[in-house]
Image (cartoon, rainbow, N blue to C red):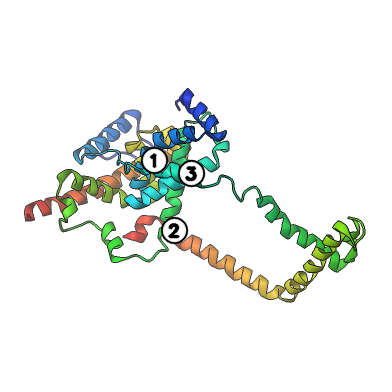
Amino acid sequence: MEYGRDGELTDAELAEVEAETRALLARWGEPKMAAPPADLSARVVRRLSTTPAHRGWRWRPLWLAAPLVLLVLGVWGLSIDSNGPASLFGDPATGAGRYVLGITLVAKPLWHLWLAGAGWWLLGLFVLVGAGWLWWRLILDAPLAEVWQ
Amino acid sequence: MSDPPSDELDLVNRACAGDQSACATIVQRYTGILYNQAYRMLGDAFEAEDAVQEVFLRAFRHLQSYDPSRRLVTWLLTIGSNYCIDRLRRRRFNWLTLEDVAFWLPSTQPGPERSALQSAQREAVQRALQRLPESYRGVTVLRYWHDLSYDEIGAILGLTEATVKTRLHRARKMLQEALAAEEEVWNTEGMAS
């Protein structure tokens, strides 16, 4: 049976095509639920009990904050003074100030490295984004059936 | 959309509190449904088993974000649907073996697994399903195998009811054509044997 445009079926037509499809499937002995292996639930439960929940997530904010700290301390160290951030935490020669000074001194060469190769970095990033975009448009967005047939 | 059963919320709360028996009950109750969804979507029993394990892992990892106004099964099917679509997309970049290709093509020779009429019919439907694009396959499986309403399918796949109807409309036509092709192969085999 032919109907009008997609999604414009009346309730009666919809009920009819639904019944037709169910009858067609019934002719093929479907729909039937595929039975999972008998031990699948037990395997899932075992795996759940051996996989620690939320592991890694607890420390994730720290990993996200670390580059930001390096970025800020590096910029401060390069543009103003290496001792500046450390002096906020007391004497740069002792205690927490010493650690902050250490991080600032680590961040500065990283910034130098980045600035030295900024052109290449940007070019690489541009190529990477472009390739990713092409990959997405040409392959991921294509309907599966077109790929397989 | 129907309200979630009252014991579901209790189960989820207990599972969130770390009750292992509540987790086990949820797993036992929904393994079959998730396995069926994954099997119909991915078309492979081993991949479906992996999918079920992964879906439950993801579900329990994010159980705190479960919205109690939804049925647990629709929430789990949402995770299952996303996982299957991700997996189908990743599959495109894997090298195919000749066996993989053979799986996707309609069989022209009766193998030993097709000896039983019922199982051969099921395989034919399974092959017909695999020919549908993933977005159409998803709505078809949820509608006809899980008997969900358009509203529920829309909630699971993040679509409007109109889009669900449109996709189902096209999917029905494609499924009819695919099954007609299967029937042709079926009849040819019948005459040949």
Which chain does tag 2 point to? Answer: B
Task: Give the residue displayed 70% in from the left and 75% down from the top.
Answer: A119
Which chain does tag 1 point to? Answer: A
Residue B43, visible in the rendered structure? no
Q: Which of A5 and B86 is in front in this view?
A: B86
As drawn, the label of residue A41 is 1
Q: Where is residue A104 in the image (x, y as percent from the top left)?
A: 82, 65
**From mark 3 to mark 1, how far is it between C-alphas?**
10 Å
As drawn, the label of residue A48 is 3
Q: Which of B33 and B131 is in front in this view?
A: B33
Tag 1: amino acid? Ser
In this rendering, is residue B85 above or below A3? below
Tag 2: amino acid? Arg
Question: In this image, B111 relative to B42: left or right?
Answer: left
Q: Nearer the viewer, residue B5 or B106?
A: B5
Q: Name the residue under label 2.
A: B90
Which chain does tag 3 point to? Answer: A
**From mark 2 to mark 1, how far is it between C-alphas?**
26 Å
Q: Where is residue B63 in the image (x, y as percent from the top left)?
A: 54, 38
Disc 1 on helix, strand or loop? helix
Quarter of the image with the N terminus of chain B in it: top left
Disc 3 on helix, strand or loop? helix
Quarter of the image with the C terminus of chain B in it: bottom left
Q: Do labels 3 and 1 share a chain?
A: yes
Q: Where is residue A16 in the image (x, y as percent from the top left)?
A: 27, 32
